[in-house]
Image: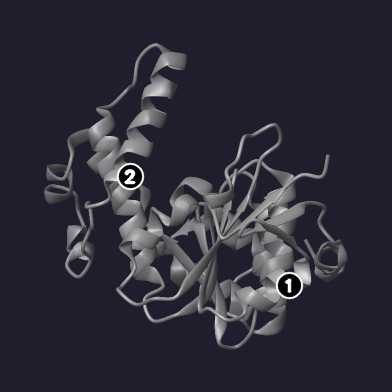
Amino acid sequence: MGILITAMLVLTFPQGIIHHGGDTVTSDEMITILEEVPVVFIGEKHDDALAHMWELYIWTNLASDERCLALEMFETDVQGLLDSYLSGDLSLDELLESARPWSNYLEDYHPMVEYAAQNGYSVIAANVPRHFASAVARRGWEGLGDTEGSEFFEYISVDSSSVFYRQQFLATMEALSGQMQSMPMDPVNMYRAQLLKDAVMASSIEGISCVFVCGSFHSDYRSGIPDQLEPGVSYLTVSVIGEDESWEADQADFVIVREM
């Protein structure tokens, strides 16, 4: 994934209609508004090619020495590896071998990281290391107590006060349970693991200006990671709607839907 491919993707203008506050706006108008806040969340369906095009477009238009890229797709314990790649001290093959990237990393997320590397911008590995989330999903909060490295959470607090977010999550789990006949774990513990991910991702950008790429559930309806931010943080949300997916105007500050 070299400079040529990245440049081609940057120049590709994504399709879609942008809804904002009951109106439709242009991409330039959206970027102008997004520039005004320090934190921009882009919610995606992880296998949606259009979402990845919009992420690259928004990131390359907002990126600066003062604004970094934050990714759910890397976990906090590989930050050193990611930094080494960005500085040129680690090869792409070494990054892929050691940093546990998602299976679709090269095609869908690496162009954003490569753009940061080429321009000297920072990238944050934002997500909780997966063994912590897995421990909570299996055993609840007690699962952290007997998991090696739990001192990681000494300065991280989890806000569980959002009734809306809890109801949304549990309703989604119930729907999935109906499709799969049974859930492998207690949905409440899975919700706790979700909160843990949100809290760690919020903590990873504390005091930082960024474009944050995450699954849409982590930012839709200004819930999820936003619930865990420090009071007073100014942010806006973008949600790219998947193909044949229903959407609502208040799903995000900017809702991008496919052209009919």
Mark 2 lies on a secondary structure that is: helix
Q: Quadrant of the N terminus?
A: bottom right
Residue 177 versus residue 49 in the image, above or below: above
The amino acid marked with disc number 2 is Phe
Name which residue lies at 54% across and 55% down.
252
**Residue 135 seen in this snapshot:** no
The percent position of residue 27, horizontal first and vertical second, equals 76, 66
The percent position of residue 240, horizontal first and vertical second, equals 65, 50
Mark 1 lies on a secondary structure that is: helix
What colouring style does the render use? one colour
Q: Quadrant of residue 129?
A: bottom left
Q: Quadrant of residue 168?
A: top left
Q: Which residue is mark 1?
A: 29
Q: Which residue lies most toward the top here?
A: 181
Badge 1 density bin: few <14, some 14–19, many ≥20, Cα 10 Å: few
Name which residue lies at 37% across and 65% down.
202
Residue 171 versus residue 181 in the image, above or below: below
Q: Which disc is residue 164 wearing?
A: 2
The percent position of residue 230, horizontal first and vertical second, equals 31, 73
User: In front here: 13 or 3?
Assistant: 13
Q: Quadrant of the C terminus?
A: top right
**Residue 66 seen in this snapshot:** yes
The percent position of residue 78, horizontal first and vertical second, equals 44, 64
Q: Please state the total of marks drawn on the protein image.
A: 2
Labels 2 and 1: the sequence-earlier one: 1
User: In front here: 169 or 64?
Assistant: 169
Q: Which residue lies most toward the bottom here?
A: 65
Name which residue lies at 65% across and 44% down.
241
Badge 2 density bin: few <14, some 14–19, many ≥20, Cα 10 Å: few
Q: Which disc is residue 202 wearing?
A: none
The amino acid marked with disc number 1 is Glu
User: In front here: 84 or 190?
Assistant: 190
